Amino acid sequence: MAAIAPLRSPTGNTAPLRLLAEQAFSRAAGAPLVEDNAVDLLIDARANFDAWLASIRGAQRAILFENYIFRDDALGREFRDALAKRARAGVRVCVLRDWLGCLGQSSTAFWVPLLDAGGEVRVYNPPRFASPFGWLSRDHRKLLVVDNAVGFIGGLCVSGKWLGDPARGIAPWRDTAVAVRGPAMADLVRAFADSWAQLGEALPPDLLETCTHCMPGGRTDLRVVATVPNTAGLYRLDQLIAGMARTNLWLTDAYFVGVAPYVQALAAAARDGVDVRLLVPGTSDIPAIGSLSRAGYRPLLEAGVRVFEWNGSMLHAKTAVADSRWARVGSTNLNLASWIGNCEIDVAIEDEAFARCMEAQYRTDLDNATEIVLKMSPRRRGAVTAETGKLPRAQGGSSSRAAAGALRLANSIGAAITNRRVLGPAESGPLLVAGVVLLVAAVLALVWPRVIAWPLAVLAIWIGAGLVAGYLASRKRRR
């Protein structure tokens, strides 16, 4: 079944083109199409956390839990205690947490009750001397699998921030996830097992074998796109969807940083008459990223892409829907850090009924959003102009998207230095900060050269020693 509205050959036969589309999607994503699944759309934190906890408390055999952030707050402790209770009952509990995501959110002591109950906790990619910049690669997945029977995939971390703070008038964060049942469970378990095996002993084969006998859960076809660093399966798929969409492509993203090839694909689709829309946060949990992301609006708006900013506390969803036939939900943001640098997991769903539910939710979300326009018009007096570059004050943060923001800043600086295009006011704003930083660094280098030289020397020693250590470790493995 083709994901996008079916094309017709000159003879009127759609079957060969459907097969070609399926082949193209499978090769681009690196993931086969899995038929006969059931998929439930879960909107916002309360619906998701309640469903997750209910499944955990009913677990009989195994719980596989992989998430970027586990926060030591009331919600985090509720999850930890529920996991510990099932571990004491003999259920195998495996938790995979990201080192950087949990830094300052929860400590090793947070997990003691679960470990004492027999659960297992592994940490993804803590800093290592032999890899000075290895910490840039993160496990950004949000995946929960219970008894190989149900899997939850989306954008939510285990943190009470997603619930908001009614006492302070902070609304819940806007986020999206799905619950999956059926044969696709095999791919979800395999994705977790691959990450788990990188950090220690692999999961037992019998835990994986049960997935090969998963009964059909419904009639929904989907792909499980589980990416790892230096692969770009979802990026290729997103590019392909942008190139094949015929009627509409509606995107929601928390940390959009428009790399040139993808921006060009969206612009080309919009110029070709496709209804392309992008919904992003109006108030970002990382204010610098929010303002830098806005710098990329202009080429989209000029091409006819409609851009909207969410009016709530934080929009954290990562979704797409195209042509009322194809949809994506998961953890991947539209930036290079997610596409190429991190471990991510998404489901690409090829089902008309589900896609229409996603479109209905998108229209609902736009009721609480402000459209961005290049020039104020009487019909859109409530819209924010792309010239202002102003964003509301943020509420405080969840995830590390600094690398994505650095890409946007570098893009603006590069454009100014090479004079390859004219910068608008929103894009030129970061230039002042960058210019001041460089001037201060130059003054320090002239007046107190050691202030610059010593940190560079320490960094060079660290990187050099790390490379030598890596070489010795490689030689030892070969022997």
Image (tube, helix red, strand yellow):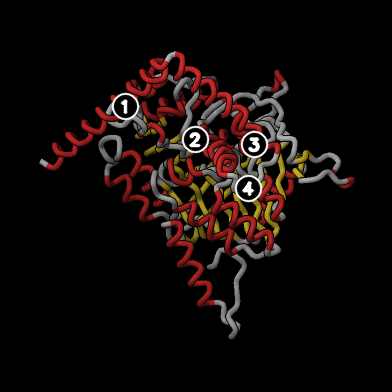
> How far is the residue under mark 4 from the one under mark 3?
31 Å
Position of residue 242 relative to residue 289, above or below, is below
Distance of mark 4 from mark 1, alpha carbons? 35 Å
For marks 4 and 1, the one nearer the N-term is: 4
User: Rounded to the nearest whole Å, what is the CA distance between mark 2 and mark 3?
Assistant: 19 Å
Residue at the spot of label 4 = 421
The kind of residue tagged 2 is Ala
Q: Would residue 346 be visible to someone looking at this image?
A: yes
Q: Which mark is residue 460?
A: 1
State which tag comes first along the sequence, 2 or 3. Answer: 3
User: In terms of image quadrants, where is residue 430?
Assistant: top right
Point out the frontmost of discs 4 and 2.
4
Q: Residue at x 58, y 46 (%)?
A: 258
Q: Sequence order check: which comes first, mark 3 or mark 1?
A: 3
Q: Which mark is residue 315?
A: 3
Q: Badge 2 local density, few (<14 within 10 Å), some, or many (20+)?
A: some
